[in-house]
Each structure stands twice: as structure tokens, then as C-alpha cells.
Image (cartoon, rainbow, N blue to C red):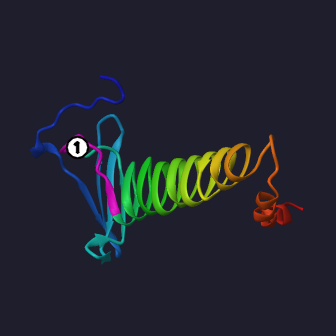
Amino acid sequence: MSALQTRSKSLDEIEFEIIEFPNGTMKRFVYENGTSFEEYKSHASWLGMPFYHRTSGRNPVTGKLVPAKGVIAVGRRAYGVIACGQMACGLITFGQLSLGVLFGVGQATTGLVAVGQLGISAFFGLGQIVIGHMAIGQVAYGRYVLAQLGWGEHVWDTRAVDPVAVQNFEWLTSLLM
């Protein structure tokens, strides 16, 4: 058996370790190979969601990842007001694929403000490849663009300097000097 494979167990053999904390409950299962499944949910909730929900590993009952869903959600897949995970969805997100409404940080991200390798923003984007009203990146598109290679209405890049773009990014040049 490889390190990732585990012996099948009947549902009767699966016993979770349940740990009660003052603010929440931890459910844990350790496989024979040392890998584990953990899920923590806070007792406090808001709008029917736990205030804090964290998951890691595969659930031994289903063999699947359990998404974290809460006001603050942390897990491989996370959905919440503030979400952090490989794939995160919410108002404020952090993750490889980060689908934020207000703010997103990640490898590929969205939001009113998006910071990432690929950033798609409604207002401000910062990253390697960026789209946004105001975009700063290696390759960027927007109304006001500061980039190595940019396209848009007012562009400041290696090919041209639009005075309106320079004026728009005056705040940045004053920070750097």
C-alpha cells in the first residue's frame, strides 16, 4: 500500500476523536498511514454559518474533502465572508483560485481589488497579468494602466507615457521617492 492509500473500513469501524473546546468542537480521525482528517467548527454562528470553520484531509466516511463554510472559512475549498484555501470564494479571499467580491489575493483572483499573478478587478488590480479600472502589472489592461506592456485609455508603459496616467499614479511615485 502506498502512503496515500488507506485500508477500507466499514462505517462501524470509523471512530472520530471528538474534542470539545470552550468555543467549538474538533472532530479528528487519524488513518493507519499517519494522515488525518480534522474539522473544527465554532459554537458561535452568524446567519446560520459557524463563525469559524476549518477542515483538512479527507473524511473517512465519504473519502472526500469537506469544504469549509463559515464566516471565517479555512480549508482546501473554503466558502465564507473571509475565505482562505486552495479554492476560496467569499467577500474577502486568499487562495490559489481566489474568487473574492471585495478583495482577492491569489494566483488567479477576482474582486473590486485583486492582487495576484492573474488579477481581474472591477476597481484596482495589481499583479503579473491584470485587468481593472486601475491596473498595475507586467501586462495590464484598464482605464489607468501602469505596466511593462499595457493597453487602455491612459497607459504608462515601456512604449509610451500618457500624462493623465502619470498624474493618476502620482500617489505611487510619491510613495517610492
Q: Residue at x 29, y 40 (%)?
A: 31
Quadrant location, the C terminus = bottom right
- The number of discs equals 1
Q: Is residue 155 left or right of residue 79?
A: right
Image spot of residue 107 (x, y percent): 54, 45
Which range is magenta?
A: 61-69
- Picture quarter containing residue 63? top left
Q: Nearer the viewer, residue 166 or 41?
A: 166
> Quadrant of residue 134 in the image?
bottom right
Left or right position of 136 against 161: left
Task: Look at the picture and state if 174 lies above or below 146.
Answer: below
Task: Give SS at disc 1.
Answer: loop
Name, please, the residue furthest toward the right.
177
Give the residue type that dot 1 points to. Pro
Asked if residue 31 is among those painted magenta in the image, a careful observer would answer: no
Please tell me which residue is depicted at 33% across the width and 34% down the height of the picture: 33
- The quadrant in which residue 101 appears is bottom left
Pointer 1: residues within 10 angstroms few (<14), some, or many (20+)?
many
Location of mark 1 (residue): 60
Q: Is residue 74 above or below residue 33?
A: below
Residue at (76%, 58%) from the top-left corner? 165
